[in-house]
Each structure stands twice: as C-alpha cells, then as structure tokens.
Amino acid sequence: MKNLKMKSARAALDLSQQDLAAKVNVSRQTINAIEKGDYNLTINLCRAICKALGKTLDELFWEEETD
Amino acid sequence: MKNTKKFILRLAAVAVFCSIICYGMMKENQQTAEDIELQSVNTEVHVSNGIAQPESTMQNILISKEGSYIFQVNCKPDHEGLITGCIICDEKEQVVFSCSGEEWTSGSSKLNLKVGTYTVAFYYLANENAYEKFWKDAGKEISKDVEGLFQDNGKWDVCLEYGYGEVKEKSLEYYLGIVIGIAMGLALVVFLKWIIQKMGGKVEVGGRKCKESYDERQMLARGQAYKTAFFTLLFYMCSVAAISEFSENPLLMSFAGIWVGVCLSITVFAIVCILKDAYMSLYENTKGIIMMFSVIGILNTGIGILHFDAGRPMIEDGMLSIYCINLIVGIMFLIILAVFCGKLLYDKRNAKEEE
C-alpha cells in the first residue's frame, strides 16, 4: 500500500527523495520503496523519518480505518 | 589507537593469507616433479601351474646427482589375472619404493637420493606364495587380500614403464617474489582507490562495517543475495562432482574450476544486490564503482588474452589451467559492470516517475 502521507509531507518541505534519504542516512531507493509500499520499515527508521519531516508516527504511518 | 589496532589486524590478516599461500605452494612443490621421462619395456609372461616365467624383469636407473626425486612406475598387462609387483632398491639393496597390483600407475613420494645405480625390479606374481614373498622382500605387510585373483596357466603381454624426475626445490627468492606479488596487488588496489577518489569517485575497500555502510533494506536484500549465491556455489560444486564422476570429464576439477564456481557465485550475489539496489553502499557513488570495475575488468581480461596469445594452455590434462583465471575474473567484473550500468540507465529513466 502506497504511503502517500509521507510523500506529501516530503513534498510540502520541498525535499527530494535523495534529500530525505541523506537526512535519515538511507539510500534513495529505500525512501522510494517506502513511499511505494514495497518495504516494511523498522520503528527506528519510522522515527528518523518522522523527525526529519517534523511529523508524528500517527500522522505518517497510521492507517485510517475505512468503513 | 583504534586505527592502529585496525591496521595491525589487517596486516596480520594479510600475513596469514600470504603464509597460507606460500605453505600450500611449498607442500605442492614437495610432491611434484617436473618432466618425468618414462622408459618402457614389453615382456611376455607365461604362467604354467602357477609358476611365472620369467619371474622378474630388472632395469637400472642411474642417479648422477644427489637430490630429491620422484619415481614413477606403471604396469599395463593385456588382460587380467596376473599380479605384478615392483621394488626399487639402492646399491645397498635398501628398498626405497614398492607397490603391486594387476594394472597400476604408481608414483613414489619425494625421496632424497644419493648418486648411484638404483634397481627397478618388476616381479610377476602368479601364486599366493610368490605374492607373500614379494611383500616380505619389500619389508612391508601384505597390502591386500588377493585370494582368487591368480590364474594357474596363461600368457600375458605386459607393458612396463618406469622413470624418475627431479623435484626442483624453489628458492627463497621465488617465495619472496610471490609474497611481494601479493603485496603489490594489494598496493595496486589502494592506489586505485586513491586515484578514483582524486577523480571524484567514491569506493570503499574494506572500510566501515557492513552495518554502517548499508541501510536496513539493503542489509535484508544483501542477506537474500548471500543466500542465493551460497546455493549457486553449492549447486555448482555438486554439478562439477557429478559430471566428473559420471561422465569422467574432469574439465572443472582444478584450481581454475573452483574459481569458476567462486566467480559464478560472486556474480550471482552482485547481480541480485544490484537489482535490489543494495550493491552500492551509502558511502559510494556510481562513478567510483564504474571506474573501479572497468579498470579491474579490463586489466584481468587483458592479462587473460595475453596468456592466450602467448600460447599458454587454457586446458591441461583435460582440466582448466590457471592461465584461465584472469580471463574468468575479468569477464566476471565486466558482466557485473554491464548489469550495474543497465540498472543505472533503467533507474534514470524511472527517476522522474518515482519522485
């Protein structure tokens, strides 16, 4: 499942995938894989991304339930 | 302090590696002789009522220089049923080598021989008593049960071959040359890394720990790649053993053959890593990788072609020779480089969509 919240938070800060990758010390492809929903990241990386984007875990990674 | 410790550890690792190679070469050197020239003798052996006629064939070998030698003796009868034994004695009739069997090819271990005439005696053993006497004369225990192997009557044409070769001990300079060669190889890698860095490329040669160099997704992907490479090597080794065993084709049963397997598994590992974006660490860039692989690939392929051009045998005794190794390694690096460049182009094409 695509992580559009993270993608939009990144875009809001005008950061490229490469910029965010450099901030959280991962490769650009890893950020791409997370946004595309191809990779289940660890809680440590979740926290690092949240800090870099100035968001909470809920705001970026909590899926809202749909009826 | 930490860096000194690291440096000492690396130096120790290189020293151990060099020592293992030198020790292996010295051991190999002790057991092989160059250019054994075989003399052959054909004998017609008649066996009547369990008595062989003639009983033996004697030949002399003159050793004109003291040194280390290896004897080689072969026995090829035209059909089964006759056991032939061989004893090699010095001038004081001390046995230096012995063997027996129906049809055999046998070589001694390295022997330190003095100047003199050595007698090579082939005994035709047509009954159990002759067999027991042969081994008693040889000063050894009977080597195997031969009951039922003898024929009371018959005629055999036996081709006997014998020869010797000097084991040429390699000088200290030779081993020193090997160690310096390895050291030069390592120095070349360091120099190459320095040149690449000067030109704006980033490569890591055994620098940081894997944990620091790759992110968590890359570590997972690399684990998968190691697994695939491991099973590839396992499959390759089993296939080579099976081919050698069942079709008697020893092509890959050599040092170079093992290198083919190693290179194959490294190629599989690298390709899986490249396809999963886990080959390049966080501290490397594409320029560095491309430059490094181009130089290593072209250098090795060039040396391989030079070997081929110089007429060095690519296949020796039906097996891949060591002269193939450079070519194999060169091709491996060029294949990995091609896949790396292909993936780079593919990523560039899709980069805009991904953003």
Image: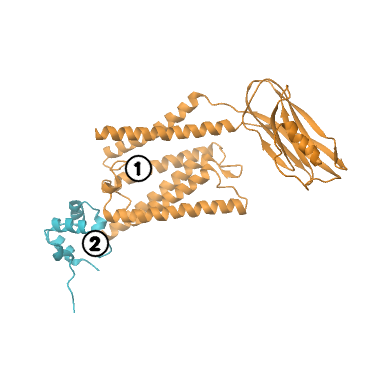
Give the residue type at disc 1: Met
**Residue B14 falls in which quadrant of the image?**
top left
Residue beneath disc 2? A34
- Is disc 1 placed on a helix, strand or loop? helix
Residue closer to the observer: A55 or B126: B126
Q: Please state the total of marks drawn on the protein image.
A: 2
Residue B140, how many percent across, how many down?
70, 34
Residue beneath disc 1? B292
Quarter of the image that includes the C terminus of chain B: bottom left
Residue at the (34%, 53%) spot, across then down: B222
- Is disc 2 placed on a helix, strand or loop? helix
The orange chain is B
The answer to whether A53 is drawn above or below residue B48 in the figure is below
Give the residue type at disc 2: Ile
The cyan chain is A
Residue at the (58%, 53%) spot, across then down: B243
